[in-house]
Each structure stands twice: as structure tokens, then as C-alpha cells.
Amino acid sequence: MSQLHLQVARRILSHMQSACLPAGEHVTEQELEKVTGTSRSPVRGALAYLAKQGVLLHRKNRGYFLLRAATEIETADLIPEVTEEQVYLAIARDRLSGVLPTVIKESEAMRRYQLPRDRLRRILGRMANEGWVERRAGKGWSFLPMIDSPEAYSDSYEYRRILEPAGIQLSTFKVDAAALTRLQTQQQFLHTSGYMSATPIELFEANATFHEAIAAMTNNRFIFQAVARQNQLRRLVEYSGSIDRERVKRQCGQHLQIIKVLEQRKFERAAGLMDRHLAGVRIEKMNPRFFNGRGLQLAPLDTVE
């Protein structure tokens, strides 16, 4: 059962309880489409879930009927509370798949994701800090341009291949031993066992931390800002793309090699390793398992915890 279906099921229950629908009441997909603000497919999935939970009875060719009064139903027992992290990922998924427009009003988002305004604003505030949404001067929020296609993703990695290895060879590059130690501890954990259990968000943040920490050692503010911006732009793709855990392990191993060579102050070799690392990741990420022929291949949201 996807998180979208659970969210729609929660909206349906809320509507039935507000209307104090009695046992035996007939509920229709057409009516619930209007109530939930979603298409028929999510409504159908939510109704099937509620029937499986014993809330509704499905009669062939007749539809769904309430088995008991809506006010007697305990929503919390039937539908797990949706966390802010899950809503964050749901918004990311809906934006990347084209469900959400460029501009969205808070009232629309509150209704769609069944959130009070304060929780929604916390999530939108986090998105704004990460650089993929901004508050409009009037009402609403605007989604900013993102890396949202295989072509854009490939271009991003080619740009990083020019930028990051060159930064390591600058005369201003200075090794931060304490930062390298922290990176080594984090990457070693992921390489040894953490790659199997870490969430997509945790994996992305560890990767972003690695590249931004090395960019900071260039002591060039523009290089650091450019690397950080590329991480912001690819954030949603990484959060929603399918995960090859063995690929993650390989990449962490490559990170550890770069850290070791930087500790030895062999900057030319480290730059070469960084270039090969980025080139290899670009090729692996263009695999059809990560992208489909037309755009993004999104992982089912209910597999992301």
C-alpha cells in the first residue's frame, strides 16, 4: 500500500466522520474524487484498502458501503500517522512526476497532504533551505528549476568533472585533517555495513557532505558554492531514484581512496581519482534502472522509510 493511498484513505475517513455517515451508507468514487482532490486511481486504491481493513464492504457492480457508522471508526488504528519525512518525499515525488504545478498554494497543499498549516510550513521551509522551493511575494510557493531529466543529470556530472578535480589542484587547496577524519569515519561505516540500511536521504546527505567538504578545502568560495548548488539541484532525483546498494558500496570505497590520497597530499592523483569517480557515477546513474526512456524512474514511495 503506497503512502499516497494511505493519505487518500485518511482524507476519505475524515470526510465520512465529518459528515457523520451511518452504517450502510453508499460511497462513490466520483463523489470522493471531489472531496479528496485526487484522481480516480488513488481513490480506488484507498477504498480497496479501507475494504481490506473492514471499514467498507465492496459489492460487485454496486460499489462500496460503510460497514459501521463513521463516528465509530478509530482512524489511528487503521492508518499509521504520516511523518513529515514521508510527506516531504511525497511532495518531491509529485513534483518530479508532474502532478504538482510550478506554483502551489498552502491551502491546496494542506488539503492534498492532509496537514495543518504549521507542519506544512516546516516542510516547505526545509525545502526552501535546500533550494528547490521559494515563498512567493503574494500567496503560495514556487518550485525552482531542478535537475529533472537524464540529460540535465548528465550535464551536471560533466560540469562537476570540470570543477571538482580542478579545485583539488588549486594552489589555495589546503587539507583539513579533522574534516577528512570525520569523512573517513562516515564513509567507512557506509562502506562496511551502513550502505544496506541507510535511507535514500541519509545516503544522499553523506555523499553531499563528502563532496562539499573537499570543495571547502579549495578555499575558493565560488567553487564551494557551485558544488553545493549542484547538490541542491540533484537532491530530489537522488531522493526518489531507485537505489543500487552495491553501487553505493563501490562509491563509498572510491570516496575512501580519495580521502587516503588527500591525507598523503598527493593532490594530482586525488584529482584524477575524483575525475574517474564522477565519470563512473555518471555512467552508472544513467542506467535504465535509475531513469526510464522518457525521464525519471521513481521508486515506489512506500519502499522509502
Image (tube, helix red, strand yellow):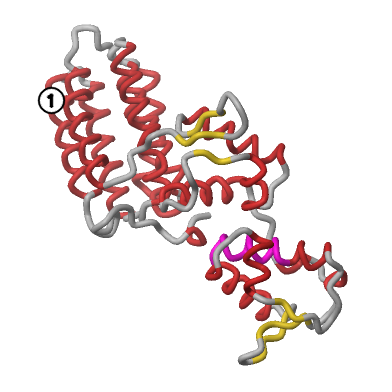
Check the image and name the residue furthest to the top.
172
**Element under disc 1:** helix
Is-magenta flag for residue 2? yes
Number of numbered discs overlaid on the protein picture = 1
Locate residue 215: give its quadrant: top left
Kindly identify the residue that appears in the image at 68 percent across and 52 percent down: 114
Instruction: State left or right for residue 286 relative to residue 147.
Output: left
Q: Residue at x 36, y 26 (%)?
A: 229
Task: Give whichever of 6, 70 is nearer the camera.
Answer: 70
Q: Determine the residue positioned at 83% across, 66% down.
A: 19
* Residue under label 1: 269
**Position of 169 relative to 127 (above/below):** above
Residue 25: name its quadrant.
Answer: bottom right
| Residue 304 is a magenta residue | no
Would residue 280 be found to the left or right of residue 60 on screen? left
- Name the one closer to the observer, 151 or 142: 142
The quadrant of the rendering that contains the N terminus is bottom right
What x and y, as percent, mark residue 186? Answer: 41, 36
205 vs 62, left or right, is left
The region drawn magenta spans: 1-12
